Amino acid sequence: MNTYGRQAVEFSRGEGSWLYDTNDKAYLDALSGIAVCSLGHSHPAVTQAICEQAGKLIHTSNIFPIGQQNLLADTLCRLSGMDKVFFANSGAEANEAAIKLARLHGHQKGIGKPDIIVMEGAFHGRTMATLSATGNRKIQAGFEPLLSGFVRAPYNNVEAIATIGANNPNVVAILVEPVQGEGGVVIPSPGYLSQLRELCDKMGWLLMLDEIQTGIGRTGEIFSYLHEAILPDVVTSAKALGNGVPIGACLAQGDAAEVFQPGNHGSTFGGNPLACSAALAVLKTIEDENLCDRAMALGQRIVENLQQTIGDKEYVREIRGYGLMIAIELDRDCGSLVAAALDDGLIINVTAGNVIRLLPPLTISNDDADLLVQKLNPLLDTFAQQ
Ligand code: PLP
């Protein structure tokens, strides 16, 4: 169906940080399939895991125990500090699980109409529940009636949330992105998550973090809450978890991990042997190759380079980054830059109208990271002159 405005270029193969179109023209990939292919394209460890597993067993259903799913759950729990995992197939589905978990938790506490606090500018997905939780009217328009049970608060404002809570006994949880990705790479003040943790503890709410874009190493930790040494009650993951093989996960710890019982939730494909094998290879590679530290170092390198080369241009409002989630905010809309960059063999993204979003693979070389900045500089000048 006609759901996407697509670019004119089609890719036929990829290797590391490079994609090649059907005419074999090379493109430096600073998008990674929107924060998905964090190990780059055709990573040998992922390819091998998929091929080996496909030759053995792809799917059995969750009616039976699945060894690879158990292994992946153990690995994820060890890395995240969570206790249990529900596996889905996408980010929206992972968030659906979190939303259902919070509601069921509310009912178990005797709250018949539980509310979840969600943020202005948030993006949580395109299913009915997740678009209702999303703080963007464009995504909701035409799909009313939206789901009730979401209360909106400004992002990066803990006091506003405390005020809502003081007047609403039905609140059971906060659902929040540690960095708003689709919203324009909005990075909250340091300590934001710790303050939310404190508030949730005081109010008896679940802290639920949507780490679908920030997670799996992108911000320099496997999950970005680890920067603040706190634990959420629930965390959702997808995107980079399978490096392109569809998989989503809703992780929980403590009481939140005990909310779902058999029959409460499910997924035919969720956590099948193929997807879990791919994700196991992804996590092993990230650990073996120390890619979280690499993301941090690369992010600093790119942001410093950008500051030096384009930081002084009058149309550049701000350059900001958190690991390898990098934004160049301009003083004007710049959607046309995407096609101009493609012409020049560079894949970038523009979000929130005027924010160039860079999400290169965690495996990008220093030379290619430098090339990315070199390519952007003249592109921006040409754009500004038009
Ligand atoms: N949550 C966040 C923070 C996202 O960035 C996205 C996708 O961009 C989603 C949820 C939805 O994920 P999916 O497209 O896999 O359903």
Image (cartoon, rainbow, N blue to C red):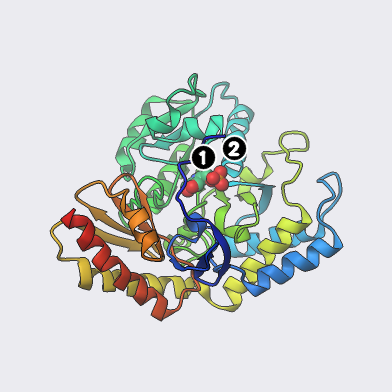
Provide residue 136's location: percent of width, then percent of height: 39, 34
User: Circle 2 sits in a helix, a strand or a loop, which is it?
Assistant: helix
Relative to 236, 167 lies left or right? left
Relative to 113, 352 lies left or right? left
Tell me the quarter of the picture where residue 374 sits.
Answer: bottom left
> Is residue 230 visible from the viewing direction of this image?
no
| Residue under label 2 | 96
Residues 136 and 7: in front is 7
Question: Looking at the figure, which quarter contains the N terminus?
Answer: top right
Relative to 109, 327 lies left or right? left
Amino acid on which disc 1 is placed: Gly
User: Spatial distance from mark 2 to mark 1, Cα to Cα?
Assistant: 9 Å
Residue plotted at (48% across, 53% down): 213
Provide residue 80's location: percent of width, then percent of height: 58, 60
| Residue under label 1 | 125
Indicate yes or no: mark 1 CB to ligand 1 under 8 Å. Answer: yes
Can you say whether 313 is above or below 140 in the image? below
Residues 110 and 144: in front is 144
Provide residue 295's location: percent of width, then percent of height: 45, 71
Label ID, residue 56: none
Residue positioned most to the top: 145
The reply to whether discs 2 and 1 touch (Cβ–Cβ < 8 Å) is yes
Residues 228 and 214: in front is 214
Amino acid on which disc 2 is placed: Glu
